[in-house]
Amino acid sequence: MNATGNAIGIDVGTTGLKAVAVNAGGELLREKTVRYPTRLAGLGAEQDAEAWWNAAIESLPEVVGGEPVSGVAVTCQAPTLVCVDANVEPLGAALTWIDRRAGDEARELAEATRPTRNPPDPYFGTAKLLWLVRNRPEEIGGASAVLCANGFIVGRLTGEFSFDETTAGLFQGWDGDFDPALPDLVPLDLLPEARPAMEVAGGVSRAAAGVTGLPEGTPVVHGGIDAVGAALEAGIFGAGDGLVEMTGFSTVVITAAERRTRVPGMIHTRHGVGEGDLILAAMVTAGAVTDWGMRLTGFENPAAFDRNVSERVPERPGRLLMVPALAGERTPTWDATARGAVVGLDLDVDAADLALAIYEGTALGLGDNIGRLQEVLGDLSPVRSVGGGSKSESWTQIKADVLGVPVTVPRLGHGAAAGAAMLAGMATGLWPDEGSARALVAQAGGTFEPDPEMTGKYAERLKLYRDLQGTLPPITRALQGPKRKRSPRQGAD
């Protein structure tokens, strides 16, 4: 397939939808982000899928700009599930990846199926699907399909139900296919067939063209999880290409490996390109913790929060130590009840100290996870940083100092949406081979060199971090009482 026109990438993120247009030379032409809220209550975390589509039709006409389009791909927060009818209308709220109410279901599924590389946890999609069966039978009963976030947008664009292999990998009991015991336990027939990320799902319908500005008939590929987009933007096509950390609401560390490689405690799924897998480490809250810190300290925006660290903190490491597990944790502890802590408080602590503790705590969590990956996979250099967090020079420098290696921000530097555009262009022939796609991301946007003295200090701090992380579970479980409902809010980009 030989294509002309710009590649359009869409990322259905946790805090908002971003759309980008990238031309054949890899230049980012236009981008637009539209935010939407998440409803948080205890272990629940829901969104309105219609808000995703409204964000798409608000952002796409401006991003498309009336120019030719070679193809479209969608990446997304994952696994996030929504029941839909035959017209891709949502039948209820979407359960986001943050939702951890399906703990009992995850344990039951683990007992009934053979072990896979991914641990049983309510984060994964199969447990969420069983939770929907038990708690929202009216939605399941009326559903024509259960879609993930990218599948919902693909469905709205094309009218076709879509489910890709990179998302399927985040369903408990799937590792190329589903465990044979699962069809008797979970309505897998509501999930579309898992297809390769770069396969074309269909063309943009006339109705979707009218509200998005996308030309009718434009190829729309199945797409994948946001980690695939981040990997491609960072030049991670296969094993040996290093790793990328993507910080938005959460932090996800992504590296490629040979098919069926296993790293205990980590997340394993398909890559969107080639024949390999992606191995992920994932902290639930990172950018979300900066959002929390902004609300506590009164900073009006992330830039002001960032300046408070770069201009007011006299020295690093800071006076406080933080474990930033404010909404349960995925890797390495897989503890839905985990909560965070800040230690070292005294009467002289101010907002700058707390801001630095947030940056350092999330960076130490990053270092902890990467260390565990390297124990199995060996050296994972070079290290790259994408997403909203990479826009902070202070935060990225702290990450470089904690890791003790240079951290590079790619030229595109816009996270999963830019990678989604690459996926679209590769699938439709705008970039006909891996070499031409790699050339788009070969140029670095900037590199942060570690300070060896600071790296040594952070190595000592990491030991304290791990000690604190290990002492928290019994304390936080004893303290947890009834949860109060929170109004919908938007998180950090």
Image (cartoon, rainbow, N blue to C red):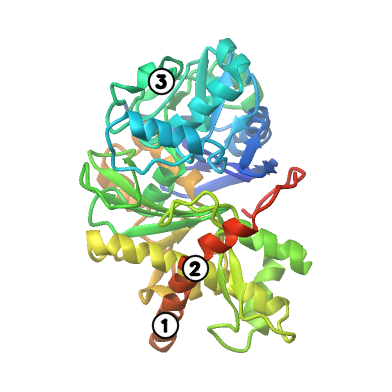
Q: Residue 14, how many percent across, how many down?
A: 59, 44
Nearest the camera: 98 or 65?
98
Q: Residue 401, how many percent across, how many down?
A: 43, 78
Q: Quadrant of the N terminus?
A: top left
- Label 1 or label 2, whichever lies nearer to me, is 2
Label located before the other in sequence (3 or 1): 3
Q: Residue 267, how many percent across, how many down?
A: 36, 47
Nearest the camera: 345 or 420?
345
Label located before the other in sequence (1 or 2): 1
Q: Is residue 423 above or below residue 395?
A: above
Q: Amino acid at mark 1?
A: Glu
Quadrant location of residue 93?
A: top right
* Residue at image location 37% in from the left, 73% down from the top: 406
Residue at the spot of label 2:
471
* Residue at image location 44% in from the left, 51% down from the top: 334
Label located before the other in sequence (3 or 2): 3
Classify mark 1: helix, strand or loop: helix
Horizontal side of 6 relative to 339 (left or right) equals left
Which mark is drawn over residue 393? Answer: none
Horizontal side of 97 relative to 295 (left or right) equals left
